[in-house]
Image (spheres, rainbow, N blue to C red):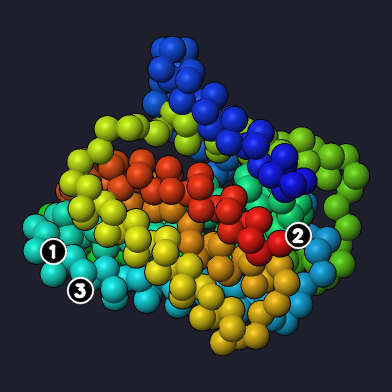
Amino acid sequence: MDIILKIIPVVLIFLLGYALKRLNILKKEDGDLFLKVVYYVALPALIIISVADVELRLNFVFLPISAVLTALTTTLISYWTGRILRLPRPSLGTFIIGSTIMNIGFTLPFFITAYGKQGLARITMFDFGNMAIIFTFVYWLACKHGATDIDQKVMVKKLLLVPPMWALLIAVLLNLLKIPIPSFINDFLGMVGWMMTPLVMLALGLYFSPRMVRMGPVFSATFIRMILGFACGYVLANLFGLEGLNRSIVMIGSAAPVGYTSLTFSYLENLDKEFAASLISFSIIMGMIITPALILLLQ
């Protein structure tokens, strides 16, 4: 019951964002600004203060490994499913990357609310594997199904300039070297970092659209990303002998909705953008139900 009461305000912020868009007080484009602040400022700050003082254990290495293995498995399944559905090349590309990319940013407010710093620190390590495969293998898949040539330098640059990944490396270094963060810097990072939950949920509310197309492929891709993703997480958690919070992180993270990067890649590589937008909107609806439910079930 306590978890439900903690999660309800998070859902209400999402509904507030959608209401503000419907009332023309905020626009969808404002969500881009909110997510930029989260990506470049709030999330890195929160990662540093969360990971720098958490007890790191050897089995944490299974978190990013699980993310990579889940992504590869859903990629393979979505490739053959898309071929069976006989999707045109641009739509097939969007179908594959949408089924692969985990929207960990969506799950973060729920993890922070339910598990605090410990939850954030571990889901960040899980997301390390997710981001690594997004900006390498998944981007290559988008290019392969798109109309432009693959630019290896662009892929390397994107991977090297991911602020949350640098924040994680800095935090791990501070942790291992036992370097304390000065109190005034820690307070500053805390104030900046805790903006993340309201900004992410407001942005999701602004992005959400009830208008959807091609519901058959949309449902199929969401099923692969979330339901089969959860199944992969369950198998990997058992395979690696994960327990407690690590087990929950892998299973819930693997069931995350479709990532917004799928829309970005669809735009950059001339894939099916309308299909990507519908896929993201539908998966958000499912995520608002499935993510809190899994947190409750895995308590």
- Left or right, 168 with reference to 92: right
Amino acid, disc 2: Gln
Disc marking residue 85? 1
Disc marking residue 191? none
Residue that label 2 marks? 118
Q: Name the image quarter holding residue 168.
A: bottom right
The answer, for residue 220, to whether it is visible in the render is: yes
Q: Residue at x 59, y 83 (%)?
A: 238
Q: Residue at x 73, y 72 (%)?
A: 244
- Left or right, 28 with reference to 89: right
Q: Are marks 2 and 3 in contact (CB under 8 Å)?
A: no
Disc on the earlier residue, 1 or 3: 3
Residue closer to the observer: 94 or 78: 78
* For residue 126, above or below residue 191: below
Residue mark closest to the camera, 2 vs 1? 1
Assign a secondary structure to mark 3.
helix
- Left or right, 283 with reference to 55: left
At which x and y percent is residue 220?
27, 59
* For residue 157, above or below residue 283: below
Assign a secondary structure to mark 2.
helix
Residue closer to the observer: 213 or 159: 213
Q: Are marks 2 and 1 in contact (CB under 8 Å)?
A: no
